[in-house]
Image: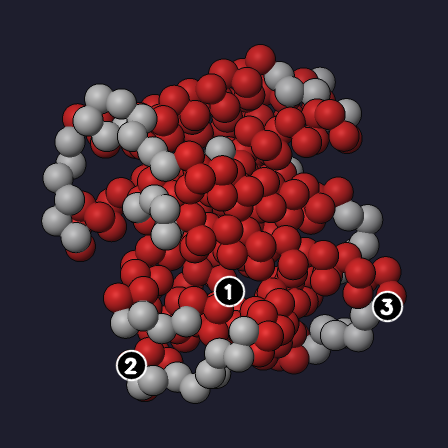
Amino acid sequence: MKTKGYFFAVVSAATYGLIPLFILPVKLEKFSIDVTLFYRFLIAAAFVLGILIYKKEQIKINKIELSLFSLLGILFALSSEFLFLAYDYLSAGIASTILFVYPVLVALIMAFFYGEKIGRLTMISLCVVLTGIYILSIKQNALDINYTGLFIALLSALCYAVYIVKINTTKIKASGFKITFYSLLFSSSYYLVKALALKQSLVLPSSKMLLNITLFAFITSVISILSLVFAIKKIGSTSASIMGALEPVVAVGISVVLFSEHLTWKLSIGIVFILLGVVINIIADSRQAKKLNE
């Protein structure tokens, strides 16, 4: 059971870490990010709806589910909103890296608002992961950063953290597919309202853009969010979020392989710290499970 949870968490982290690969071409063409995200979430919702129909799952929701799913959708949309806004102040790599402080926020929210105890090994894991993320953010021997961008990126991390916590703490018995479908649908609705309010055209400029957004939707939304939901249900929000620290490792790998970024000693050390933190978290989780079984 736990092994599957870690597998889903790794898949979620790896696919979510591919966001810069799809969003940077959109920015280069100066196409509306709001319209891009509207189609991203709408297409992703259509994919998941197909799965729900195939599985013959009940799509109808009640008022309580409506309020929860709309909240999840808005949280996920705001996380994307702040992240892409941060790209205007920071490089995509730095902004995406700052997003990954969300495991700390998840742990703090769970501790202060839900009484979840944070074990010593889990705290060590969080500190090691944060150290790795800090190292990945260093430029020219100092944390060279725009503080407006830093604040906006932290807001993205907070929204993502609350999204994870709400999934973990909700008492509604809905499948991962159903939660994902409505999260995507309400995220899409958020960007549709925003695009229309700003009088932005919903027309896509080319079939190439449509293909890029479709792949963007399927890989970074459908696969990533479904995997995250399943991971949270199997290993909990704190462990799943710590595993999410693998996302900047993926982002760095893409930069090195596809964008010819040099694999410096700083990048290497940062990756090692993150991987070490993830391993410590798995050890902490297995020890806790062993104690519960004794």
Q: Amino acid at mark 2?
A: Lys
Is residue 23 rendered to the left or right of residue 118? left
Q: Residue at x 48, y 83 (%)?
A: 202
Give x and y (percent) for residue 179: 68, 61
SS label for mark 3? loop
Is residue 112 rendered to the left or right of residue 74? right
Q: Residue at x 64, y 27 (%)?
A: 108
Instruction: First in sequence, mark 3 or 1: give its number.
Output: 3
State whether residue 4 appears in this view: no
Q: Residue at x 62, y 38 (%)?
A: 237
Is residue 58 rendered to the left or right of residue 291? right
Q: Nearer the viewer, residue 106 or 88?
A: 88
State whether residue 56 appears in this view: yes
Pointer 3 residue: 62
Pointer 1 residue: 222
Pointer 2 residue: 208
Q: Amino acid at mark 1?
A: Val
